[in-house]
């Protein structure tokens, strides 16, 4: 059986394959959504985050603003450098935090330990309502 090999087509095909493989990393980077940009040293918190004082009592229990709260199984606590910390390492300490509650269960889902500068900034307290928007004059 005679095989037909054309060096012109095989080298061109190889070159196209190599070029396509080299372009793949560029395409993947461009397709990723941009993360929100914060200035150096500042963190962004979700719009639903509220301010409070957290005290971890046990693996599943805590106190939030002096009231008992259950901790979600997937609780994430971020320190001032935005690194994850284990809840048991913070047991018994009153901590100023921004937090998000799990909507379906009412358990504490995420908490951010605040820096002194973040703690001084204004934040929504639990149960606080936003000021009503002024009605436009017609």
Image (spheres, rainbow, N blue to C red):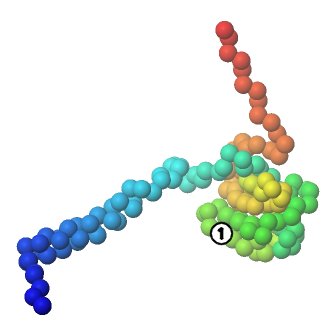
Position of residue 77 relative to residue 88, above or below, is: above
Residue at which label 1 appears: 84
Can residue 54 be seen here? The reply is no
Q: Tag 1's secondary structure? A: strand
Count neighbours of disc 1 (C-alpha within 10 A) and say few if under 14, some if 14 to 19, many if 20 or more. few
- Image coordinates of residue 105 in percent, x first then y, are 83, 59
Can residue 9 be seen here? The reply is yes
Q: Quadrant of residue 113?
A: bottom right
Residue at far top of view: 138
- Image coordinates of residue 45 in percent, x first then y, are 65, 51
Q: Nearer the viewer, residue 110 or 83?
A: 110
Q: Identify the residue shown where x is 67% and y is 64%.
A: 79
Q: Quadrant of residue 56?
A: bottom right
Image mark count: 1
Q: Quadrant of the N terminus?
A: bottom left
Q: Nearer the viewer, residue 136 or 112?
A: 136
Q: Identify the residue shown where x is 48% and y is 53%.
A: 33
- Image coordinates of residue 127 in percent, x first then y, are 84, 42
Residue at far right of view: 67
Residue at far front of view: 1
Q: Identify the residue shown where x is 23% and y is 71%.
A: 17
Classify residue 31 as left or right of residue 24: right
Classify residue 4 as left or right of residue 27: left
Q: Identify the residue shown where x is 47% and y is 52%.
A: 34
Q: Quadrant of the C terminus?
A: top right
Position of residue 21 relative to residue 132, above or below, is: below
Q: Nearer the viewer, residue 52 or 16?
A: 16
- Image coordinates of residue 120 in percent, x first then y, are 71, 47
Position of residue 40 relative to residue 1, above or below, is: above
């Amino acid at each position: 059986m005679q095989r037909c090999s054309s060096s012109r087509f095989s080298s061109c095909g190889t070159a196209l394959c190599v070029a396509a493989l080299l372009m793949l990393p560029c395409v993947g980077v461009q397709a990723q959504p941009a993360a929100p940009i914060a200035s150096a040293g500042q963190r962004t918190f979700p719009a639903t985050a509220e301010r409070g004082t957290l005290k971890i009592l046990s693996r599943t229990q805590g106190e939030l603003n002096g009231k008992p709260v259950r901790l979600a199984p997937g609780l994430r606590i971020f320190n001032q450098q935005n690194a994850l910390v284990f809840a048991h390492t913070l047991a018994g300490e009153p901590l100023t935090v921004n937090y998000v509650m799990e909507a379906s269960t009412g358990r504490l889902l995420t908490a951010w330990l605040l820096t002194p500068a973040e703690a001084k900034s204004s934040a929504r307290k639990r149960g606080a309502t936003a000021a009503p928007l002024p009605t436009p004059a017609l």
